Amino acid sequence: MTLEIRQHGRVGAEILGIDLSCTISDEDFAEVRNAFAEHGVVFFRDQSFTEDQHIAFARRWGPININRFFAPHPAYPEIALVVKEPDQQHNIGGGWHTDHSYDFEPALGSILAARELPPEGGATAFASMYAAYNGLSARLKERIEGRRAVHSARHVFGSKAGVYEAAQDSRSDGRIGNSAAADVLDDPVHPVVIIHPLSGKRAVYVNPSFTVRILGLAEEESQDLLAEVYEHCKRPEFQEDFHWRDGSIAFWDNRATWHYAYNDYHGHRREMHRITIEGSALV
Ligand code: SIN
């Protein structure tokens, strides 16, 4: 099979000619890694891989982060379940975010595999934080350059959670848990603009779900600046949707993209399997 990389609209690349159920060659791995670093998210279609193969593919990238808050797959703790049942209202990931920015060494990326899809809807939107950085006005760029921001999971997964509404869903049935662990987490500080560890490109690294304030600014000024940055990053020209089909897999870079899951398929079941790969401290 010959590997082919096609731009996916405004954000991401689709990779064809690869079977993720097999051990991929070092050459193909290097090409996938370059596409991942360059585009921020890569998509694969018509894959048929088992949970063991999902785990094996993830391990090529680095150690797996066992999620502290999402319900694990009953037989594979490495796999976090992202499920919405037909009678549930809230979905997981239904707001712009990047996974694990609340960690001191934020995750490299997440590999999401579709396992059961609704007949319609249930797409995932991605926004490129490379493009968002490049599109900043000189004024906004100057205001955030060199700044650092505090990130937290406590307001999201902790006992006072409100943002991540699935945590509050009376029918969440254990989808999100471990709030006591979230309550005692320390909050890391990361640069507002990072140099991406693989591509060397600059990317905006604050997100509406987990960033709580910018250091060195009064609370109101910090919130106003974050709001301005978010409004900019949400511009349609930096976004693209990914429409899932059976056998689809998305592998996003948490340092280069935001994502959110559409919640437009009430009454239907959606089950996704997510594996998150450990990253490193950001500069
Ligand atoms: C997530 O935010 O990790 C889940 C995204 C999705 O279910 O589409």
Image (cartoon, rainbow, N blue to C red):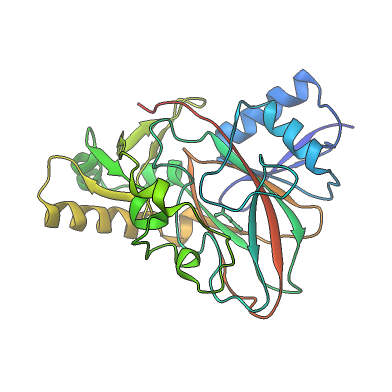
Identify which residue is drawn at 68% across, 33% down.
58
Ligand 1 sits in which quadrant?
bottom right
Identify which residue is drawn at 81% across, 53% down.
247
The relative height of residue 83 versus residue 233 in the rendered view (above or below) is below
Residue 191 in percent (x, y) is at 30, 34
Query: Left or right: where does residue 27 sit relative to residue 103?
Result: right
Identify which residue is drawn at 65% across, 62% down.
83
Depth check: give the residue in front, 104 or 171: 171
Query: Left or right: where does residue 53 sit relative to residue 89?
Result: right
Depth check: give the residue in front, 59 or 242: 59
Residue 248 in percent (x, y) is at 76, 52
The relative height of residue 166 versus residue 128 in the rendered view (above or below) is below
Residue 39 in percent (x, y) is at 57, 39
The relative height of residue 158 versus residue 267 in the rendered view (above or below) is above
Residue 167 in percent (x, y) is at 47, 63
Where does the N terminus fall, quadrant-wise? top right
Depth check: give the residue in front, 248 or 94: 94
Query: Left or right: where does residue 260 sit relative to residue 83?
Result: left
Where does the C terminus fall, quadrant-wise? top left
Work out which residue is located at the far left of the displayed protein and give it: 218
